[in-house]
Amino acid sequence: MRRRRRPLPVPEPHLMAHLRSTVWGPAEFVGLPPRRLAVEGLLAGCAGAGAIVGTSVAGAWYGVPGLADGEGGLVCAAALALYLWVVRAGQALIGIVAVLGICLALQAPPAAAGLVLAERGRVGSVVVTSVEGGPGTVSGRSRYLCSVADGDGAPLKVRIWRGCGQTTRPGDALAVVYDLTGRVLPRGVEPGGSDLGPLHGLGGWIAALVAGCAVAVVRSCRLGASGQDGASGS
C-alpha cells in the first residue's frame, strides 16, 4: 500500500501575526492612525531628507569633499534607518527607507553643485578640443562628451556634456558656468534648461522618503498595557 503523506503543519495564527508584525510593523490601531505618530513620522522624514540634501549643499558651498561627494548624506540615511529601528518599525519598511535614503544621498551631490553654480557661478566661453561618446560608440555612452580649453589654451579637468551634441566639432565654442571660488567644477550651460531650480529633480526622492518614513513610524504603533496607544491622538 502506498503510504499517505502527512499534511504539512499549518503555522499557528500567533506566529504569522508575529512575522507580519516584525516585517511590516504591528500597526496596533483601529481606524485612523494616531496623530502623534503621523506627525512624528512626517517630521522624521523631512528632517532626514533635509539633512541628506543639506549636507551635500553645505559640502559643495564650503568645499568639504566628504560632504560634497555624498558621504555625509549616506551617514544621515543610516541615522534615519537607525531611528526607525529604535522605534521598532517593520524591517521591510526600514529597508525601503534605507534604500530611498541612499538613492537620495547619491542624487544630491550633482544637484547641490548645480545650486552653488546657480547662486555664485559666472558664465564663460571655452573651446572644444575633442568630442567623444554618443550612441553606437565602443564605450556605450549615449552622451557626447567634449574636452575643452579656456581662452588661454589651458585644458579643463572635466569634460562637458551639457551643450555638447552630435553637431559639435573641435574648435566650436561652448558656454560653461564657473564657480567663482573654484570649489565646484564647471559645467556646460544646457540650452533651454529648466527654470525650476537645480534641486527640482530631487522632489520625487524626497517625497518617497518622507512618505516611507511616515508609514514606517505609523505602523510601529503598539498598544500599551491599558490597550491604548500612549498618545491619544487617534
Image (spheres, grey):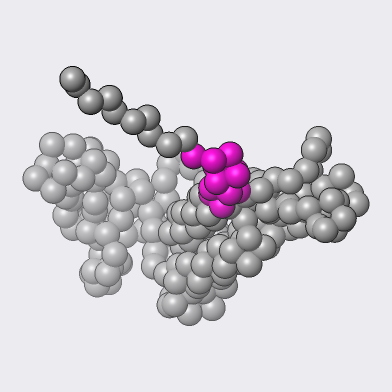
Residue 79 can be seen, yes or no: yes
Residue at 23% x, 25% y is: 3
Residue at 60% x, 44% y is: 14
- Looking at the picture, tell me which residue is in the foreground, 157 or 97: 97
- Looking at the picture, tell me which residue is in the foreground, 109 or 209: 209
- Looking at the picture, tell me which residue is in the foreground, 33 or 138: 33
Magenta residues span 11-23
Which corner quadrant of the image does residue 150 belong to? bottom left
Instruction: Tell me residue 69's x, y (percent).
Output: 42, 69
Residue 65, compared with residue 79, is above or below; it is below
The N terminus lies in which quarter of the figure? top left
Judge left or right: residue 131 versus residue 49.
left
Question: Total of numbered circles in the picture?
Answer: 0
Which corner quadrant of the image does residue 130 belong to? bottom left
- Looking at the picture, tell me which residue is in the foreground, 25 or 55: 25
Q: Is residue 17 magenta?
A: yes
Instruction: Tell me residue 135's x, y (percent).
Output: 18, 37
Q: Residue furthest front?
A: 1
Judge left or right: residue 158 versus residue 207.
left
Judge left or right: residue 67 versus residue 228.
left
Residue 119, compared with residue 18, is above or below; it is below
